[in-house]
Image: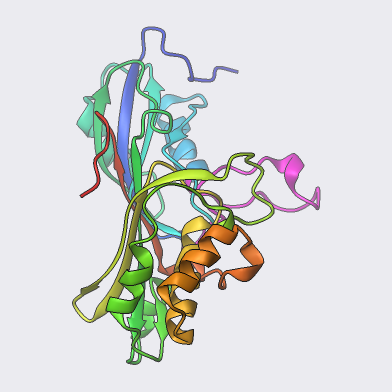
Amino acid sequence: MKLMTEKGSSRNIKLLIAYDGTDFSGWQTQNTWKTQNAREAPRRTVQGCIEEALQKLHKHPVSLAGSGRTDAGVHAAGQVANFYTDIQSIAPDRFTPALNSLLPRDVRVLAAEETHSGFHARFDAKARTYRYHIIAGRHAFPHELRYALQLWNCPSVERLNSYARLLRGEMDCSAFATPKDPRESRFRYIFNACFFVQGDALVFEITANAFLWKMVRSITGTLLSCEEKGVSVSEFQSLVGGKDRSKAGPTAPPQGLFLWNIAYGGAYRSP
């Protein structure tokens, strides 16, 4: 069986992708041997859906590399992925309508372009930005509940940012790491973290070179919990320095989180 993964004489196509993660088990294709029940139906993933569409176009399997994994229920407005194609008759930008005609409504290719042969969506990424959306102090509309966390209180943006300003530079993120994360190093470089008001919603934005599993949701839940409890800035700093996940706050639910942007090119600089 032919599997299009090698460069060879093929073209390397870069995709910009958005998706509603509500009905997906995350980005990454799940290996059937990892499921607890051998009879369990394959889990629906974003990568899997796009690779199915690519296979229909190419008449053989095509491997898709994403810039990063998103968990079940997490959305994306700026996911980046790439694949190698042996189809020469389709202009790069025409992969956008071609794939969208084969994809379900909750996945859209926003743009497609040809890139250099060595480009890899994950390994070439310099920074990843996530945004977490919050509806605070009012009743959310039903459709908003798919894409935001409902809070009945109105947290202080000033206090939240007094905590968030401490999340900068290279740091040990063990306080926000799930014990199930298999990666040995818990160090990540955070370029920026801040809360801002957008319309009548509260948004938490964070940019880093990479993230641990559920790290953004752990940070968001901890910041909101600390604000609600009136934790001082020095106490929050001690919490981060303590590197103990059990002392931090809850993990925020997935529906408010969006993979917002992936930065490539030269060295990333903080805004």
| Residue lying at 42% horizontally and 80% vertically, measured from the top left | 227
* Quadrant in the rendering for residue 16: top left
Residue 108 locus on image (x, y percent)? 33, 50
User: Residue 158: which quarter of the image?
Assistant: bottom left
Q: Is residue 85 magenta?
A: no
Using the image as rendered, state which of residue 155 and residue 120 is in the foreground: 155
Is residue 73 at least partly visible in the picture? no
Considering only vertical position in the picture, is 152 above or below 226?
A: below
Residue 29 shown left or right of residue 62 in the figure: right
Q: Which stretch did the figure color magenta? A: 22-46
- Front-most of 71 and 203? 203
Q: Residue at x 57, y 55 (%)?
A: 25
Q: Is residue 25 magenta?
A: yes
Residue displayed at 48% across by 36% down: 51
Residue 94: in sight, yes or no? yes
Q: Is residue 10 above or below residue 70?
A: above
Q: Main secondary structure of the magenta part?
A: loop
Tell me residue 75's x, y (percent).
41, 59
For the residue pair 133 and 162, the one nearer the viewer reads as: 162
